Amino acid sequence: MFKVNRRGVIIFICALLLSGLLSGLVSGVSYANVLLDMVVAVVNQDVITWSELYKAMEADATPEVKKMSKDEKRRVLKQNEALFLETLINVKLQLQEADKMGVRVSDAEVKEAIDSIKKKYSMSDAAFTESLKGEGFTFEEYKRRLQQQIIISKTVNALIKSKIVITDEEVNKFMAENMRASENSESFRISQILLKRQKDVDNSRIEERADDLYNKIKQGESFSDLAKQFSEDRSSKAGGELGLLKKSQLNSKFIDVLSRMQPGDISKPFWSESGLHIIKLESKEAAKSKDEQWEEAKLMLSNKIFAERYNAWIKSLREKSFIEIRL
């Protein structure tokens, strides 16, 4: 239900207003008011308060959690608070390290990042501000969070990413050990409606049901809605979506049907060992060339090395820091 420290996004939702004893005085919050907010962790010279923790958790909650009643939401947050606190501690440590290194971010850099986000999603100033309100952020809060995201990104780039050098030999070895030839087959993004085989049930009755569903789809009814209502597969909750599947993962009956389909096509009902299927081909991807496979392997290896070094760096920061958890 929560996205924890994935590709730097955690700073967007976790970079907190430092409302501890020192920052509270600077921001005009009285010492007495700070004492009313329980400190849940001390990280060197900084603190994390209970309100900061829950504000961050609520901001990062999934839409499903946000729609819950107050009591239900509090229960879910309570179950995740210890894990999320560990993430916030890591955020504090990275910001402290960046401060020691003198890493700074100008207002112009923040503005450029915001303009890039608005351009990417074709959002006007008004639409962007409204989107922030929907997520529970003021514009100034968002700017502070984005600024801290950029600060940590700069720090990580300087200390880790910029120092990763991968040779051709290392990429070739990684490919040989981790990437099988069968994984490079053609891929299909598929949705399906499945009517399972049933004991003591005449197949003709199942075929009649499938034909009825097929005709409804051809007449314009939503494939996704019908899958949610009638499909007997676990994918029904997702509207029948099976995701992107390699050709090597599919049985011969599926491959035979798909070979005659184009993206957007709906198959006629067909039998497999599982039952009677109606499939929709959402999209397909050709097998990658050797050069594409090599570049993909290089990126995978780079990401693997980065994750290992990043985790080791975080561990070293924690080992040399004073951390007290009071949750």
Image (cartoon, helix red, strand yellow):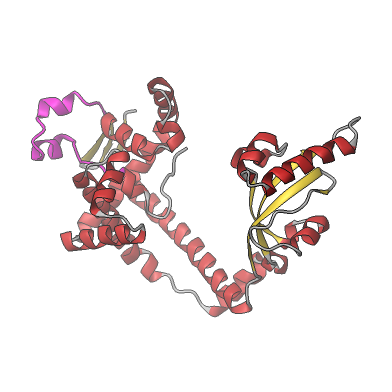
Placement of 61 over or under 76, stated as above or below: below
Which residue sits at x=83%, y=48%? 272
- Quadrant the C terminus occupies: top left
The residue lying toward the viewer, choosing from 34 and 269, is: 269
Where on the picture, by quarter, is residue 141?
top left
What percent of the width, then of the height, locates residue 253?
82, 56
Placement of 85 over or under 261, stated as above or below: above
The residue lying toward the viewer, choosing from 72 and 39, is: 72
What percent of the width, then of the height, locates residue 294?
58, 75
Q: What stretch is highlighted in magenta?
A: 14-39
Quick one: which residue is furthest to the front in this view? 219
Where on the picture, by quarter, is residue 325?
top left
Q: In this view, does 87 lie to the left or right of 216?
A: left
Question: Is residue 29 inside the magenta stretch?
Answer: yes
Which residue sits at x=85%, y=46%? 273
Q: In this view, does 277 lie to the left or right of 27?
A: right
